Image (tube, grey):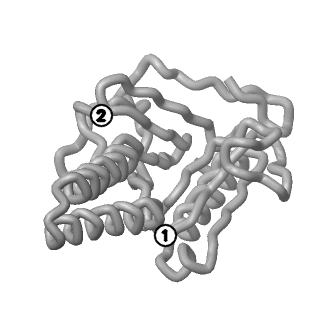
C-alpha cells in the first residue's frame, strides 16, 4: 500500500497474476521469476550492456596475450597462467551480465538477480521520489549509463553501494536516457492517476 500526495492510499492486489500473451515482444514468460499483476505491462526488459565490464575484458585480454606469448617462448607455466586467468575473467563477465535483468513495467521497477537462487528488488512508481542518471564520456558515447531511483532525494555525491539512501541502482543500462524518460513518464502518470 502506498500513500498518495492527497492523503489517499493506493492498494495493490499482489495475489493476482496474469498469463503471458505469446505474441508479446518482451522476454518475460511463464518461467520468469516475476509474476505480473493483472493488467500490468512490461515496458523495458534489459540486461546490463557488455560495455559495463570493458575494464575487466581488457585485463582478460592481456592475460590471454600473456598465455599466447608463453606458448611462443615455450613457457608452459606462463601460458597456462595466462589462459586460465583469461578464462576466469571471461566467465566472471558472463556471469555478472547474465545474472541480472532490469524490468520496468507500467507500475513498478524490478531488478532480478541470480541464476539458481533468485532475488528481486522492486519499487512502485508511486513511491519514487528521486531519480538520478550518471554516465562517463566513454559510456555516454556507447549509449549506456546508470539509473538510481529512491523513495528520497538522492544526494549529489551518490556513489553506487555507498549512498546514504536506499536507492535501487540499475547499472550499465543500455539506452539509459530512454529508460529514465520511460520511468519519469510512467511515474508522472501513476501519481496523477492517469492510468
Query: Is residue 188 left or right of 145 when viewed as pictured?
Result: right
**Residue 128 percent location from the top left of the image:** 71, 44
In this orientation, does residue 25 appear?
no
Front residue of this view, candidates 16 and 174: 174
Query: Is residue 160 left or right of 177 when viewed as pictured?
Result: right
Residue drawn at 25 percent across, 57 percent down: 78
| Count of numbered tags | 2
Residue drawn at 43 percent across, 36 percent down: 113
**Residue 57 percent location from the top left of the image:** 38, 64
**Residue 11 percent location from the top left of the image:** 63, 24
**Helix, strand or loop under label 2:** loop
- Identify the residue position indicated by label 2 in the image: 32
Query: What is the spatial separation of the Cα atoms under label 1 and label 2, in whole angstroms?
Result: 23 Å
Q: Residue furthest top?
A: 15
**Helix, strand or loop under label 1:** loop
Dot 2, how many residues are within 10 Å of its Cα: few (below 14), some (14-19), or many (20+)? Answer: few
Amino acid at each position: 500500500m502506498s500513500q498518495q500526495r492527497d492523503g489517499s492510499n493506493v492498494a495493490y492486489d499482489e495475489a493476482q497474476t496474469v498469463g503471458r500473451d505469446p505474441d508479446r515482444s518482451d522476454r518475460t514468460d511463464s518461467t520468469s521469476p516475476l509474476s505480473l499483476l493483472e493488467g500490468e505491462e512490461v515496458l523495458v526488459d534489459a540486461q546490463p550492456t557488455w560495455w559495463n565490464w570493458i575494464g575487466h575484458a581488457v585485463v582478460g585480454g592481456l592475460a590471454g596475450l600473456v598465455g599466447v606469448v608463453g606458448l611462443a617462448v615455450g613457457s608452459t607455466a606462463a601460458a597456462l597462467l595466462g589462459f586460465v586467468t583469461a578464462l576466469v575473467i571471461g566467465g566472471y563477465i558472463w556471469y555478472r551480465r547474465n545474472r541480472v535483468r532490469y524490468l520496468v513495467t507500467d507500475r513498478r521497477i524490478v531488478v532480478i538477480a541470480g541464476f539458481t537462487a533468485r532475488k528481486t528488488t522492486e519499487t512502485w512508481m508511486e513511491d519514487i521520489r528521486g531519480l538520478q542518471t550518471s554516465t562517463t564520456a566513454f559510456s555516454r558515447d556507447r549509449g549506456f549509463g546508470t539509473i538510481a531511483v529512491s523513495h528520497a532525494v538522492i544526494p549529489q555525491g551518490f556513489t553506487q553501494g555507498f549512498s546514504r539512501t536506499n536507492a535501487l541502482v540499475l547499472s550499465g543500462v543500455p539506452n539509459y536516457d530512454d529508460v529514465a524518460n520511460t520511468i519519469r513518464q510512467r511515474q508522472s502518470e501513476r501519481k496523477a492517476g492517469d492510468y
